[in-house]
């Protein structure tokens, strides 16, 4: 080919790395360095309010975690929160994606509406649901009363379980669109011949779903599971505004506890240890995710 | 097979259609009603908004909640006056920070993404994986060092601190999205330009980038939305109206106990309008980008 004969001042290798250099420098400075530094801080007693007591204490912060009630409780809250949010999101997203995959009047409108929660900042999501769940004037109370489903207004967020469930519901509303889009993209790749064949075989709707749709959706579903697990695990904005972690510590997830530890108690050492536990767990999940993409061949360049 | 069963022609109830439309309506209501409620409330007087049973439409529509951000009334001044005062500033701050983030991101990501879409080079897979891995790093893991770093350099409560942190968030995603968009740009264009003896930069600037423009816009919108919606870093890094972004001020409304719900709703609506408008305007490209990169913006 003629292109080969041209003079090439730089090999592709050098050129590519040069092109990547700016992004790599920024990432190294602003992510790699802080992460390493945060590990260093987690090995110290480091409280902004008592700077003179700062000292290197090795793994003591981590050792303290094992008997730290606040930490263990937050870890449990986070785990259950992930399970509830994930379960609801996947089921709702799957149904909505299946609906959007059909042809019907108003499909475009529904797709646009589905982007609405995605565009909404987590903080606004939190304050929106606060006005809806409000005990005295909330829209949920009003609606359920008018429909005759409840007699009196309820204080939805005052019991620990109630607050937890309603916080999860608010989180689901916010993260739903993302899963829907990924599943919808997966659905649209299913060749229609498969459905035709199944129809010829007189497979019912349920059979078609189990035998044709589900196997094809396995991969997008796994991606949704992994990414939504990570999102729910580090959920912060909505919870912070909706319940602030309360009542008691019923909705204090690990991310919330970490921010409280740092912002309120200025305990940077312990806060960094919390952060590193979160990082380690997230990293484990993302290794699974990347392995998955890798197997699918998403990485061919 | 010999006997033909005679089935009387009868009208079959189109169950599939019915289920489909019922589900579509239920989902539409689920998606839109919560948002409708704060929009409606933002145009209500406080009395109407907290009435029992609730008014579902503003019976006496008013703009006072919005106008209050410019000239707060005495009552508004009394409850949650600070957050009200800070709202216009925070909108300006958010706009500046998000726009700068989008531009800086594009400048950095375009080069990297180009290399993945056009060049074969050693280590490209590892590098791509590393970018993805950095995207997975939870913000909370770097927030403490970030805070200490910014404090050392005297950058707390400045735009720069926010722009830098949001750029690092958005950069890996932007590279992933752009890489996919760039691949769909036909190579022949650049080869034609090369035949015409255009230099590499010239080719990029006047041939490649204009063709790739839709992808660039989509990536910029992603970065803008990431920056606009972010809360945790803004909470740590800002403290006054000089740099507080709209999520921080909106959260102030929520954590303040005697806030009027109507004013809070108005602030919430103002905070949603820019990202929502962008999402609807660039719907197709964004959906494409989300699906391609499997990333959350």
Image (cartoon, coloured by chain):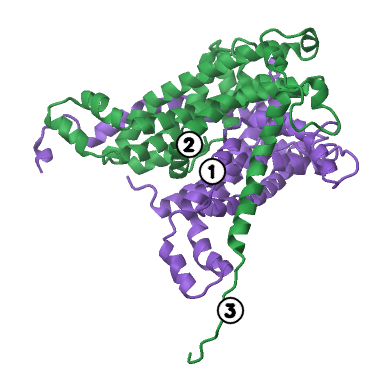
Cα–Cα span, label 2 and label 3: 48 Å
The foreground one among A281 and B220 is: B220
Q: The C terminus of chain A appears in which quarter of the rendering?
A: top left
Which of the two marks, 1 or 3, is nearer to us in this view? 3
Rendered hue of chain B is green
Q: Which residue is drawn at 69% across and 7% down?
A: B71
**Are the numbered discs 1 and 2 placed on the same chain, yes or no?**
no
Q: Can residue B156 be seen in this snapshot?
A: yes
Q: Can residue A45 be seen in this snapshot?
A: no
Q: In this figure, which residue is indicated by the disc labeled 2?
A: B283
Q: Residue at x 53, y 25 (%)?
A: B227
Tell me the subunit letter for badge 1. Answer: A
Which of the two marks, 2 or 3, is nearer to us in this view? 3
Q: Label 2 near label 1: C-beta < 8 Å? A: yes
Q: In this figure, which residue is indicated by the disc labeled 3?
A: B8
Q: Percent x, y for residue B67?
A: 68, 12
Tell me the subunit letter for badge 3. Answer: B
Q: In this figure, which residue is indicated by the disc labeled 1?
A: A111
Identify the secondary structure beneath mark 3: loop
Q: Which residue is drawn at 35% across and 34% down?
A: B113
Q: Within 10 Å of the Cα at label 2, are there few (<14), some (14-19), or many (20+) other Cα atoms?
A: some
């Amino acid at each position: 080919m003629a292109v080969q004969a041209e003079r090439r001042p730089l090999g592709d290798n050098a050129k590519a790395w040069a092109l990547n250099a700016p992004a790599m420098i920024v990432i190294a400075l602003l992510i790699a360095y802080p992460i390493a530094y945060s590990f260093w801080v987690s090995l110290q007693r480091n409280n902004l309010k008592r700077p003179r007591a700062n000292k290197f204490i090795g793994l003591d912060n981590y050792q303290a975690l094992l008997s730290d009630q606040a930490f263990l409780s937050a870890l449990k809250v986070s785990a259950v929160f992930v399970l509830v949010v994930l379960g609801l999101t996947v089921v709702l997203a799957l149904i909505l994606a299946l609906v959007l995959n059909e042809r019907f009047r108003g499909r475009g409108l529904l797709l646009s509406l589905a982007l609405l929660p995605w565009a909404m900042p987590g903080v606004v999501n939190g304050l929106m649901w606060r006005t809806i769940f409000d005990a005295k004037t909330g829209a949920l109370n009003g609606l359920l009363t008018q429909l005759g489903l409840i007699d009196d207004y309820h204080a939805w967020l005052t019991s620990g379980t109630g607050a937890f469930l309603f916080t999860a519901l608010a989180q689901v509303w916010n993260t739903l669109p993302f899963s829907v889009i990924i599943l919808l993209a997966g659905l649209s790749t299913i060749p229609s011949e498969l459905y035709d064949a199944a129809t010829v075989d007189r497979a019912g709707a349920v059979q078609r779903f189990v035998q044709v749709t589900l196997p094809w959706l396995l991969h997008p579903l796994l991606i949704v599971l992994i990414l939504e697990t990570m999102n729910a695990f580090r959920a912060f904005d909505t919870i912070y505004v909706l319940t602030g972690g309360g009542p008691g510590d019923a909705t204090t997830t690990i991310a919330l506890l970490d921010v409280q530890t740092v912002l309120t108690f200025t305990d940077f050492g312990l806060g960094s240890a919390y952060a590193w536990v979160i990082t380690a767990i997230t990293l484990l999940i993302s290794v699974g995710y990347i392995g998955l993409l890798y197997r699918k061949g998403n990485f061919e360049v | 097979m010999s006997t033909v069963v005679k089935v009387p022609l009868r009208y079959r109830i189109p169950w599939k259609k019915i289920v489909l439309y019922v589900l579509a309506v239920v989902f539409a209501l689920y998606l839109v009603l919560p948002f409708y409620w704060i929009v409606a409330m933002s145009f209500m007087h406080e009395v109407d908004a907290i009435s029992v049973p609730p008014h579902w439409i503003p019976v006496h529509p008013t703009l006072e909640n919005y106008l209050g951000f410019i000239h707060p009334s005495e009552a508004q001044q009394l409850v949650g006056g600070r957050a009200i005062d800070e709202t216009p500033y925070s909108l300006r701050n958010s706009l500046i920070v998000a726009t700068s983030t989008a531009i800086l991101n594009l400048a950095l990501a375009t080069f990297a993404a180009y290399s993945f879409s056009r060049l074969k080079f050693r280590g490209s897979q590892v590098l791509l994986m590393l970018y993805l891995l950095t995207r997975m790093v939870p913000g909370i893991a770097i927030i403490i060092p970030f805070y200490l770093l910014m404090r050392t350099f005297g950058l707390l409560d400045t735009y720069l601190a926010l722009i830098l942190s949001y750029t690092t968030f958005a950069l890996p995603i932007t590279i992933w999205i752009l890489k996919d968009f760039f691949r769909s740009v036909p190579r022949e264009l650049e080869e034609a330009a090369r035949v015409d003896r255009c230099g590499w930069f010239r080719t990029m600037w006047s041939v490649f980038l204009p063709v790739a423009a839709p992808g660039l816009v989509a990536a910029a919108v992603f970065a803008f939305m990431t920056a606009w919606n972010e809360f945790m870093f803004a909470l740590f890094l800002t403290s006054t109206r000089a740099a507080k972004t709209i999520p921080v001020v909106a959260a102030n409304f929520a954590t303040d106990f005697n806030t009027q719900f109507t004013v809070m709703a108005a602030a919430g609506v103002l905070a949603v309008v820019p990202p929502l408008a962008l999402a609807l305007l660039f719907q197709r490209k964004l959906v494409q980008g989300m699906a391609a990169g499997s990333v959350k913006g």
